[in-house]
Image (tube, coloured by chain):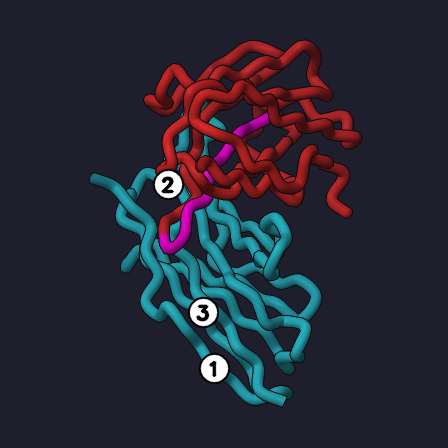
Amino acid sequence: ETGVTQTPRHLVMGMTNKKSLKCEQHLGHNAMYWYKQSAKKPLELMFVYNFKEQTENNSVPSRFSPECPNSSHLFLHLHTLQPEDSALYLCASSQEKLAGINEQYFGPGTRLTVT
Amino acid sequence: GESVGLHLPTLSVQEGDNSIINCAYSNSASDYFIWYKQESGKGPQFIIDIRSNMDKRQGQRVTVLLNKTVKHLSLQIAATQPGDSAVYFCAENYGGATNKLIFGTGTLLAVQP
């Protein structure tokens, strides 16, 4: 266990559905991230939140909408997805300091299938 | 564009042997590097990291070497065990104020008993 939990672990949704992915970190970290992991491709950073403020949106389509209500919780709201959005969605957290970047701890991911 | 890449997509080793996984990076401004291990059905797990002011760092059974001259990073695993079988990723940070990591595609390490 890394201290980062994600629910659900598996999700199948139609293209017209609306669903949300949830992430919670129990490490007291101040930064949280969403990544997309597709087969045979590098992890793609989607969003970064520092102290609950979004600091990075890596050209992600608007059908993905993140929400960070506090430093321990992160959501990814999904609507009108496409089949190519099927992937493993990973959440991570880290403790960022002025001295520089630190290691990110990942959750187990949500396996999303869009039909 | 800048990228992180891995020389060997698959590495097969015998149990007990040492493993070396290599990674090339292209951004000379990168100042932080990290290795992750990902087992099937799990998220990436932190192994070891190194900052650009170092050229070697050791952990438990693992060593990371950084050669800034040729922009090369390696992960050495001593006495490889079946439990080490996984995909290994390197990642870099371009430096500055961003906490954004750029990941490579990964190397599959297969340990033969």
Colour of chain B, in one word, is cyan
List the residue tagged with mark 3.
Answer: B21
| Residue A76 painted magenta | no
Q: Please give the range of residues in magenta.
A: A32-40
Instruction: Name which residue lies at 43% across and 65% down.
Output: B107
Chain of the residue where label 1 is placed in the rendered structure = B
Q: Label 3, label 2: how many angstroms apart (C-alpha)?
A: 19 Å
User: How many numbered dots are placed on residues in this image?
Assistant: 3
Q: Label 1, label 2: how many angstroms apart (C-alpha)?
A: 30 Å
> Are the numbered discs 3 and 2 placed on the same chain, yes or no?
yes
Q: Nearer the viewer, mark 3 or mark 2?
A: 3
Q: Which of pointers 3 and 1 lies earlier in the amino acid sequence?
A: 1
Q: Which of pointers 3 and 2 lies earlier in the amino acid sequence?
A: 3
Q: Nearer the viewer, mark 1 or mark 2?
A: 1
Query: Residue A16 versus residue B27: which sits nearer the camera?
Result: A16
List the residue tagged with mark 2.
Answer: B30
Chain of the residue where label 2 is placed in the rendered structure = B
List the residue tagged with mark 1.
Answer: B12
Q: Nearer the viewer, mark 3 or mark 1?
A: 1
Chain letter for red?
A
Q: On the picture, is B78 further left or further right than B55?
A: right
